[in-house]
Amino acid sequence: MANQSSWSKFDSLLDTTNKRLDKVRIRRRGKLLYLRATLPPKSGEPKAKQRDLPTGKSANRAGLEQAKALALDLESELISKIG
């Protein structure tokens, strides 16, 4: 089990990763990682909303690398829909 110090180190690494992203953020909830982004409205919704999307990845270095790849893919999709 991770202690406070290791979560601090991980959260610092997470902050550094998020600084390299534009439209998507990676968030830690407990031991899991989520992507947070403003997504186009679902059918019947009047406007875009910020949503948290589960990545299914653990909050560790390997999980963060995988979540970063998912975040970059989502950013690419969002940019192509806008432009």
Image (spheres, rainbow, N blue to C red):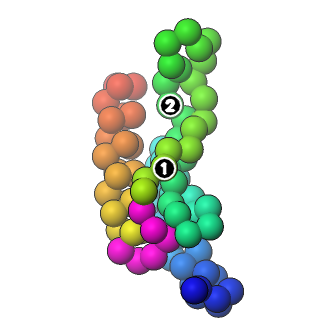
Percent position (x, y) of residue 10? 54, 79
In this rendering, is residue 63 above or below 5? above
Percent position (x, y) of residue 58? 45, 68
In this rendering, is residue 61 above or below 25? below
Can residue 5 be seen from the camera position used here? Answer: yes
| Mark 2 or mark 1, earlier in chain | 2
Q: Say which mark, if any, is on residue 39.
A: 2
Range drawn in magenta: 57-62
Report the side of 34 relative to 56 (left or right).
right
Instruction: Please state which of the two labelled residues, at mark 2 or mark 1, is closer to the viewer.
Output: 1
Local crowd size for mark 1, using a 10 Å CA cut-off: few (<14), some (14–19), many (≥20)? some
Tag 1 residue: 54
- Total numbered labels placed on residues in the image: 2
Task: Please name the amino acid that badge 1 sits on.
Answer: Pro
Can residue 19 be seen from the camera position used here? Answer: no
Q: Between marks 2 and 1, how big is the CA–CA gap?
A: 14 Å
Front-lying residue, 64 or 15: 64
Where, quadrant-wise, is the N terminus in this rendering? bottom right
Task: Please name the amino acid that badge 2 sits on.
Answer: Leu
